Image: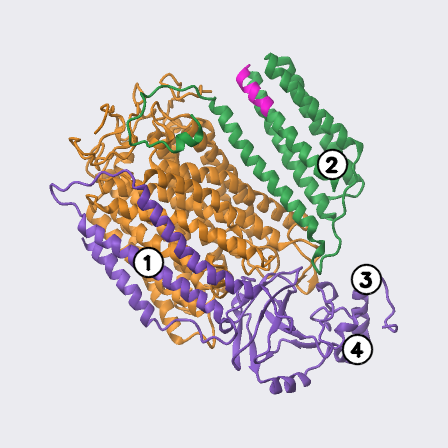
Chain colours: A purple, B orange, C green
């Protein structure tokens, strides 16, 4: 008997906890409302099942508790009941799967007009790269990394020269514009995670991963790492500033491009940089480019 | 070597001395106890680690001895020990070994020597695992998932030696499990007594059998992944290691695929969840049926559901990798297969509830644990649907929601079943009865305590609090109340931690001082309660093997004198 | 009774009188179960092999997969293992201990041949860590070789006890390892 009461109380308590919990989703700041709605649908269906099944459990415990002279009912199976239960379960499952898959369908198809922005992870900080006026990110790879070329851009790739580099600074995004965030890691796995954006994706060394979003709210948000990456995992923080397109353009104009960084680099650093590049690619003369 | 048919003439390995009887024993019951004690022993280590983790999370900064490296090491070792060395070993090596021969009417496992070897390999794997605490740099801190490249590169605690002991230990464990698993599977297929058809086996045997088959097919993935990572680490190959920067220099490795490891790991890792869950499903079915004095409802459906879940669980592994950077289109397939697996699982829940419905429910301690299991399993199973439903997983993955979910579904739930099962079979195993008051006290603190721990964690996860964080630090979206929640969770965890002392005290004290137990105290119909001796003697069955005439669930049969009919009682022809 | 009929039995209804059925030996059942384990293990390695090989498409991946040459020794070893399997089959059918000894000896010869093959590759600069293709080759052959060693051990025990039933099991085990080797060799030759 006490256990039946306890179960009923836990159900009531869980619902109350849900209603009054101070912890719920952060206010959304991106276009991924469809993910939130898929979560809501899942929550409603699962919540109903949770309440219904457990109250049934508590009720059965009370109603059929042992009393002298009482005997259980013998009934090996009831195929029609089991079939009906299977059917309704399948309906419930389909009901939550449909919005889930629909949202995923949007998640995996990046709109054509999305601007490409790169986030680079390393133990334990974030850096960013914008494609610059040509709209194309230059080739890059871990093998090109030198002290003056922290993001490992290919110095021989003309598309990379106008790329804007933000090393250990904030990520700025214009509000209302879709962005495809491509992700690259210099060392181990990381995960680009901004709770308010809902979206996240792992950074995998050796390959380039991506996801997309449209920021819908201006403000400053924390970037966290959501894939264990070593001792400093919890301290791998960054900030993303979502601002109006005008403010964004203003900010971008103040950043320096890869070409400018190359121009300012001392000759010794320059040669290291080129040796790195030449070591991996058929030698090409710098002046031709 | 013995002949292999399970007949009365089968020669057994008869022990002659104390050492061959209790140490180098080939008796499945002794091996089961050896397995269980080792598993519970190492499980206690993992329990202490979890308490240390909670101290750090609940009261950050109050324990300067716990540094980020230590914290990650606690997380990793806690996870791996609990999943593999405690739950798998206890449910299959412990309960599987003890129950299979007794429940199917065999004298022992079909390969007793291999069975013994299985335990000693397991013990060796545990010793190697524990050695990880004493090597330079300490145990690995790469998470129980051991993802490369971080598992074997700079910046991760234990990347030099700790990871080696971990991988070697896992490889040895897989060998031990394979020896045990072959035994369980072959014994079930081969050594059932006369009349014990497949569909007359108790669901415990079905759960353990299916889990063993799955283990045999899933553990090779962990084995090859461990060997390949050892090669990468010790021989400089590039199976998993890409070109990367480490300590400011470019590594000589190139072209390896971290995702390849993740696929191999989860090809093992997801079935592993069910390797733990299915024996628990089976055992809890039997507890519910016995203590509700009612046949398990829809027995055939229960068996089919176990088999279907087992088969489907090999098709869902990549739902752990929705945001891993694999081809995103896989998400559609794996979300669908994952949610389909919820249907047979839901049927099992319905049938447990329907077994209680119109039953005659005796709320003894094992039954209380079984009921608590139903509650926590419903909770954990439903929260799993959030994570399986691909796009909903995106915001929730790697947050505390995941931690709450898997602890509820494969931590708390199987552990509650294990407690229930120990209380249930203890009188048979040791011939003594435990103390009921202590048992109930243990139940209430454990059940309410774990819910107090894991319910709030779901909400922290929905808020976005990430997992495997040593400290949350200054984060704009995390309000002060989260730190209060963490302190609350830690206190609840410490209470539950201490309450386990009641269990151990009860078990050990009853071993010597408990009253002598009735051979069949619960009035159960299955074979293990019908042994001539309690505890069962070597060879289990005296001069003649039992003959089975009916299924294991003839409870409250109309017209029968008692409310259960043992499996060995001949059928009266033409039952009404 | 078919497996389907067994799994749909309504076991709460009175069944036929229990009888002792004829069953395959536990050794045979256990070994077939082990074939499942080994098959999964080798299949996963093959899948990993193909996945790792196909990775060139990734952006940062250089063409690091360099296939290994196929020396004649590979063919000779394959023939030796096939001959060993034939000898075991003779031992199984004719219950001939001598054929089993020949089969075991050929097994040892195969292992020796594999060692020579390793040294040949080592000498030619195809070391373990120089290329993933090599790493897979050494890993696969080592695991296969360990299975042969295990088989030789079991064969030794069966022969020492003159247990013809176990000799028959050894023969089946040898065939299984031959099939695994043929698949591995085909993979190594075709890539």
Task: Name the chain under label 4.
Answer: A
How far apart are labels 2 and 1 at the CA level?
Answer: 60 Å
Q: Pointer 1: residues within 10 angstroms few (<14), some, or many (20+)?
A: many
Quadrant housing the C terminus of chain B:
top left
- Quick check: do tags 3 and 1 share a chain? yes
Q: Which of marks 1 and 4 is nearer the N terminus?
A: 1
Tell whether position C164 is magenta. Answer: yes
Residue position for label 4:
A266
Closer to the camera: disc 3 or disc 4? 3
Closer to the camera: disc 1 or disc 4? 1
Magenta stretch: dominant SS?
A: helix
Identify the residue at horizontal 60%, vertical 71% (top origin).
A125
How far apart are labels 1 and 4 at the CA level?
Answer: 66 Å
Residue B364, percent across and down? 21, 45
How far apart are labels 2 and 3 at the CA level?
Answer: 33 Å
Residue B515 drawn above or below residue A286: above
Identify the residue at horizontal 53%, vertical 56% (top origin).
B332
Identify the residue at horizontal 16%, vertical 40% (top origin).
A71
* SS for dot 3: loop
Tell whether position C2 is magenta. Answer: no
Q: What stretch is highlighted in magenta?
A: C161-172
Residue A49 drawn above or below residue B488: above
Q: Earlier in the sequence, mark 3 or mark 1?
A: 1
* SS for dot 4: loop
Residue position for label 2:
C118
Residue position for label 1:
A50
Residue B468 drawn above or below residue B419: below
How far apart are labels 3 and 1 at the CA level?
Answer: 60 Å
Q: Pointer 4: residues within 10 angstroms few (<14), some, or many (20+)?
A: few
């Amino acid at each position: 008997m006490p256990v039946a009461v306890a179960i009923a109380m836990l159900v009531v308590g869980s619902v109350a906890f849900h209603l009054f919990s101070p912890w719920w989703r952060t206010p959304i700041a991106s276009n991924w409302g469809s993910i939130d709605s898929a979560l809501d649908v899942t929550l409603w269906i699962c919540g109903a099942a949770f309440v219904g099944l457990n109250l049934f459990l508590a009720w059965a415990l009370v109603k059929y508790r042992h009393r002298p002279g009482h005997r259980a009912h013998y009934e090996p199976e009831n195929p029609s009941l089991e079939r009906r239960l299977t059917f309704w379960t399948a309906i419930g499952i389909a009901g939550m799967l449909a919005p889930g898959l629909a949202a995923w369908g949007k998640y995996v198809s990046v709109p054509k007009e999305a601007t490409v922005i790169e986030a680079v992870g390393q133990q334990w900080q974030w850096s960013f790269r914008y494609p610059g006026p040509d709209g194309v990110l230059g080739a890059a790879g871990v093998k090109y990394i030198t002290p003056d070329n922290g993001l490992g851009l290919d110095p021989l790739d003309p598309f990379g020269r106008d790329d804007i580099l933000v090393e250990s600074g904030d990520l700025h995004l214009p509000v209302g514009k879709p962005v495809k965030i491509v992700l690259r890691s210099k060392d181990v796995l990381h995960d680009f995670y901004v709770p308010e954006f809902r979206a996240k994706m792992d950074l995998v060394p050796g390959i380039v991963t991506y996801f997309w979003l449209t920021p819908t709210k201006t403000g400053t948000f924390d970037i966290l790492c959501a894939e264990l990456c070593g001792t400093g995992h919890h301290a791998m923080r960054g900030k993303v500033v979502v601002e109006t397109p005008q403010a964004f353009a203003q900010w971008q104009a103040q950043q320096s491009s890869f070409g400018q960084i190359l121009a300012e680099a001392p000759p010794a650093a320059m040669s290291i940089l080129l040796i790195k590049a030449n070591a991996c690619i058929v030698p090409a003369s710098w002046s031709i480019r | 070597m013995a002949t292999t048919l399970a007949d009365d003439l089968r020669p057994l390995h008869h022990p002659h001395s104390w050492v061959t009887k209790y140490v180098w024993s080939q008796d499945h019951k002794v091996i089961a106890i050896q397995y269980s004690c080792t598993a519970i022993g190492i499980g206690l280590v993992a329990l202490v680690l979890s308490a240390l983790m909670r101290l750090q999370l609940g009261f950050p900064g109050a324990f300067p001895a716990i540094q980020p490296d230590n914290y990650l090491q606690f997380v990793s070792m806690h996870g791996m020990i609990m999943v593999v060395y405690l739950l798998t070993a206890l449910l299959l090596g412990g309960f599987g070994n003890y129950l299979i021969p007794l429940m199917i009417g065999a004298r022992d496992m079909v390969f007793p020597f291999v069975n013994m070897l299985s335990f000693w390999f397991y013990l060796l794997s545990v010793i190697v695992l524990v050695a990880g605490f004493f090597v330079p740099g300490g145990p690995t801190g790469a998470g129980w998932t051991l993802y490369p490249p971080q598992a074997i590169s700079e910046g991760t605690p234990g990347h030099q030696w700790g990871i080696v002991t971990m991988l070697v230990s896992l490889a040895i464990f897989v060998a031990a499990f394979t020896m045990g698993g072959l035994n369980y599977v072959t014994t079930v297929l081969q050594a059932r007594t006369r009349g014990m058809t497949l569909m007359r086996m108790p669901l415990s045997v079905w759960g353990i059998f299916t889990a063993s088959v799955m283990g045999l097919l899933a553990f090779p993935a962990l084995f090859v992944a461990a060997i390949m990572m050892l090669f990468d680490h010790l021989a400089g190959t590039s199976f998993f290691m890409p070109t990367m920067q480490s300590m400011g220099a470019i590594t000589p490795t190139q072209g390896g695929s971290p995702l390849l490891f993740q696929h191999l790991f989860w090809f093992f890792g997801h079935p592993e969840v069910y390797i733990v869950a299915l024996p628990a499903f089976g055992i809890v079915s039997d507890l519910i049926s016995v203590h509700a004095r009612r046949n398990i409802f829809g027995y055939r459906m229960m068996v089919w559901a176990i088999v279907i879940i087992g088969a489907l669980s090999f098709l869902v592994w990549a739902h752990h990798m929705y945001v891993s950077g694999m081809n995103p289109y896989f998400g559609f397939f794996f979300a669908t297969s994952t949610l389909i697996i919820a249907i047979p699982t839901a049927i099992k829940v319905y049938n447990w509830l329907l077994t209680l419905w119109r039953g005659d429910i005796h709320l003894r301690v094992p039954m209380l644990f079984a009921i608590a299991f139903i509650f926590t399993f419903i909770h954990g199973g439903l929260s799993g649907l959030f994570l399986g439903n691909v796009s909903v997983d995106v915001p929730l993955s790697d947050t505390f929601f995941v931690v709450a979910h898997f602890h509820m579904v494969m931590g708390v739930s199987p552990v509650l079943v294990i407690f229930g099962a120990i209380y249930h079979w203890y009188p048979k195993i040791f011939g003594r009865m435990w103390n009921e008051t202590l048992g109930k006290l243990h139940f209430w603190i454990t059940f309410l305590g774990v819910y107090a721990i894991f319910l709030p964690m779901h909400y922290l996860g929905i808020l976005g609090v990430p997992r495997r964080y040593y400290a949350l630090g200054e984060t704009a979206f995390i309000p002060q109340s989260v730190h209060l929640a963490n302190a609350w969770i830690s206190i609840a965890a410490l209470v539950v931690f201490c309450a386990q002392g009641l269990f151990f005290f009860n078990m050990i004290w009853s071993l010597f001082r408990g009253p002598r137990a009735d051979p069949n105290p619960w009035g159960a119909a299955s074979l293990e309660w019908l042994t001539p001796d309690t505890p069962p003697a070597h060879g289990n069955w005296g001069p003649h093997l039992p003959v089975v005439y009916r299924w294991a669930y003839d409870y409250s049969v109309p017209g029968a004198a008692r409310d259960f009919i043992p499996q060995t009682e001949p059928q009266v022809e033409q039952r009404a | 009774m078919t497996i389907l009929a067994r799994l749909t039995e309504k076991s709460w209804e009175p069944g036929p009188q229990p009888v002792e059925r004829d069953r395959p030996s536990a050794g045979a059942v256990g070994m077939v179960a082990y074939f499942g384990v080994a098959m999964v293990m080798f299949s996963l390695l093959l899948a990993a092999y193909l996945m790792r090989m196909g990775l060139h498409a990734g952006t940062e991946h250089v063409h690091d997969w360099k296939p290994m040459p196929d020396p004649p020794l590979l063919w000779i070893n394959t023939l030796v293992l096939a001959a060993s399997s034939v000898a075991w089959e003779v031992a199984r059918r004719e219950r001939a201990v001598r054929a089993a000894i020949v089969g075991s000896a050929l097994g040892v010869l195969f292992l020796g041949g594999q060692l020579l093959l390793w040294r040949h590759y080592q000498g030619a600069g195809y070391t373990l860590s120089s290329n993933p293709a090599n790493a897979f080759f050494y890993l696969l052959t080592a695991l296969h070789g360990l299975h042969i060693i295990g088989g030789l051990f079991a064969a030794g025990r069966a022969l020492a006890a003159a247990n013809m039933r176990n000799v028959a099991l050894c023969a089946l085990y040898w065939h299984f390892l031959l099939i695994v080797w043929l698949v591995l060799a085909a993979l190594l030759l075709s890539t």
